[in-house]
Amino acid sequence: MTNDPHDSDADTPPGGDFVVPEEDKQEPPKWEKDVVRVERNGREFVLVGTAHISQESVDAVREVIRHEDPDRVCVELDEERYRALRREQKFEDLDLLQVIKEGKLTFLLARLALTAFQKRMGDSTGVTPGAEMAAAADTAEEMGVPVVLADRNIRTTLLRAWRLTPWYRRAELAAMLFLSLFQTEEVSEQDLSDLKQGDMISEILDELADVMPELKEVLVDERDLYMAKSIQDTPGDKVVAIVGAAHREGIARWLEHDIDPDIVEPIDVVPEKSTLSELIPWILPAIVIGLFAYGFMYGDTQQLQTAATAWVLANGILSAVGAIAALAHPVTVIVAFVAAPLTSLNPTIGAGMVTAFTQTVVAAPKVRDLHTIGEDLTEWTGWWTNRVGRVLLVFIFSSAGSAIGTFLAFGWLKNLL
């Protein structure tokens, strides 16, 4: 052995500073790329951006929570979605007749469409939608860490999206939602990993903002603010928040400031219908009734009879055809023909509500339909074979048929002038 410094370890430079061999250097955890950290007022917020149908995200969530050992874990869920995710609220509990009576069938349709779309996407990766949120809750509970539901109520979000969208663009929004039912593209873990990258997310959100800015504001921007406030109000020196990758950067920007509750309160309420929205459903019936009244007093009797017959047949036949296309019960088809000409003159009740109610009564969904609805609706044929799905199709198709019939009948109504 020698004390000659030139014979010392090759990893020690002449200056004497020790250099860690490359093989001994610790790589940062794989999940670190999905994490954004915000420190403010002596507290640390760890935001984990996830893809909702990614096994990589499920694994990352578990590892982050265990590694960070936080005081609280926040998840991008509200009470309703949390219960559904934990199987405390199932579609077996659905009272379809009550839903129709309360006028919530459209909301149910939107919810089922989103559920079916997410499940179809999840089937391509083998991961249940929301599995990373369930994993976050499970891991937190195992560690004795309280879980905080940070997101806004889903019904509030959907109603705000609908009512804040201009009336002339609502058909486009409804079409987008309806077409999503039949999309069949598959995604891979690599696609999801790429999607979580900030530049790609920004590009997608910018595109959404260009196409439908109101939708982007409600679904993304407002929820960024709402969840940031929820996270900021969560007790603890260290808080881990599990959120979709599209929300991570926006939430992080809000957490860098003290959020005034006064700016959050307005986005947590369902806006009242605009005066125009309240009036539009009454305008068409008023015009139709006015034309019939004018024809009765001043028009030709033959033209009045022709217009009345056209109104009944156009509305009734096309609504019935819609019911037939949905494979409705024969009684429902008859009800569609009878009800459509009348409901077209009454804005408080639509043909679809009457036919959906009838279909539910004469061909009531079975336990099996309620139990498998989430899976059945991932295939387009399932909307006809599942009795709940068929009720929804009856609602959509008979309503559309009646609406088309109403406009076609104007060809005869105008002759009354």
Image (cartoon, rainbow, N blue to C red):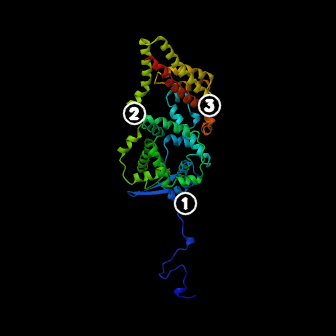
Number of labelled discs?
3
Label 1 to label 3, Cα distance in Å? Answer: 46 Å
Find numbered disc 3 in the image and state the secondary structure of the residue it sits on. Answer: helix
| Crowding at mark 1 (Cα within 10 Å: few <14, some 14-19, many 20+) | few
The amino acid at mark 1 is: Lys
Does residue 188 appear in the picture of this structure? Answer: yes
Residue at image x 59%, y 43%? Answer: 119
Find numbered disc 1 in the image and state the secondary structure of the residue it sits on. Answer: helix
Q: Is residue 355 left or right of residue 261?
A: right
The amino acid at mark 3 is: Arg
Q: Residue 141: horizontal and vertical position, in percent?
A: 53, 50
Please say if 104 is above or below 9. Answer: above
| Crowding at mark 3 (Cα within 10 Å: few <14, some 14-19, many 20+) | many
Instruction: Identify the residue position indicated by label 1 in the image.
Output: 30
Q: Residue 292: horizontal and vertical position, in percent?
A: 45, 16
98, 385: nearer the viewer: 385
| Crowding at mark 2 (Cα within 10 Å: few <14, some 14-19, many 20+) | few
Residue at image x 51%, y 26%? Answer: 403
The reply to whether callout 1 and callout 2 are in contact (CB within 8 Å) is no
Instruction: Identify the residue position indicated by label 3 in the image.
Output: 387
Instruction: Identify the residue position indicated by label 2 in the image.
Output: 272
Residue at image x 41%, y 12%? Answer: 298
Q: Residue 179: horizontal and vertical position, in percent?
A: 55, 38
The amino acid at mark 2 is: Glu
222, 368: nearer the viewer: 222
